[in-house]
Image (cartoon, rainbow, N blue to C red):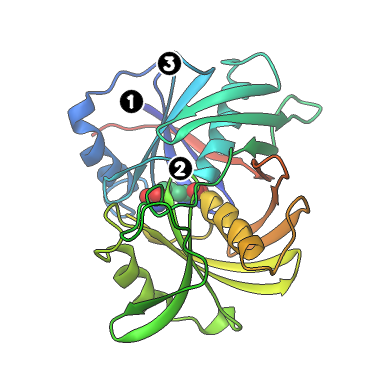
Amino acid sequence: MKFTKMHGLGNSYIYIDLFKETLDEDTLPELAVKLADKNKGIGSDGMILIGPSDSADVSMRVFNNDGSEAMNCGNGLRCVAKFAYEHNYVDQKVFKIETKGGLVEATVHPDANNQVPTVTINMGAPRLSRAEIPMSGSAVDQVVNETFVLQDKEIKLTAVSMGNPHAVIFTEDIENIPLYEVGPALEKHERFPEWVNVEYVEVVTNDELHFRVWERGTGITQACGTGACAAAVASILNGHSQRGKEITVHLLGGDLMITWLENGDVLMNGAAETIFEGEWLL
Ligand SMILES: N[C@@H](CCC[C@H](N)C(=O)O)C(=O)O
């Protein structure tokens, strides 16, 4: 089986091209775990499948490195867009990608050699009600700076779905956050029936945020694209940032530019890189 390892700001996945490869559905979770293993596999944050779609130009499926399947992946979308354009699976610079969390629109920005260093994804509108996150409690309510008791301590969180669930916690000191304790405890908390990605955000200015993530099904990663979108939306919902204005999110692996447009959609712009291609022999 041929594969390509790609990353978006250090958030790396093993990409399999289902235009060429055939995989048995039952083996996918186990394959993701094996490929992602840094000692016995290739090493990555998970596995992403790129394939044909009935409703869009290409499709993306995402598996975390614990084998769980996610509905969406922002860094993965930019890499899928780059891959699809560079492999001529699309012939336009603007095209649609199907995810389990819905359809998104990709715009690639190719260089003079027709290679794609950066991509903008229109992620669609964030989903903000508890039912859409999902999170227990009154279905229609939004969760903005809500007090949450976690292991007898109070934290304040804002919940945002970008097709996948995020819990955003604001901090005044990003270098001293209890991510290793709060991340796993909140990720699998019973109030999030599908579990949750956990983000800490420090507001630098109204258009600049520092960001750290504990990803559902993976743990700490260098970057999370949907998480950066959720952080920008949460910053606006909490009155720290402005709608319609680009926000630079500083992640461990680099920067993403996020804009929550007045029409409701969220734009994410950032890098996508190919690391290497290879053949999986096991
Ligand atoms: N790294 C991703 C998100 C991957 C899925 C996530 N861990 C989940 O389970 O929802 C991104 O860049 O958005």
> What is the secondary structure assignment of the residue under circle 3?
loop
Nearest the viewer among 228 and 190 is 190
Amino acid under disc 1: Met
- Calculate the distance from the C-alpha at mark 2 to the C-alpha at mark 3: 25 Å
Front position among marks 2 and 3: 2
- Is residue 109 shown to the viewer in this render? yes
In terms of depth relative to the viewer, which is nearer, 203 or 263?
263
Rounded to the nearest whole Å, what is the CA distance between mark 2 and mark 1?
Answer: 29 Å
**Tag 1 secondary structure:** loop
Q: Residue at x 33, y 25 (%)?
A: 1
Amino acid at pointer 3? Phe
Query: Is residue 75 placed above or below 176 in the rendered structure?
Result: above
Q: Is residue 243 left or right of residue 174?
A: right
Task: Answer with the quarter of the image where residue 240 lies.
Answer: bottom right
Please tell me which of labels 2 and 3 falls first in the chain.
3
Residue at which label 1 appears: 1
Q: Which residue is the site of mark 2?
A: 163
Count of numbered marks: 3
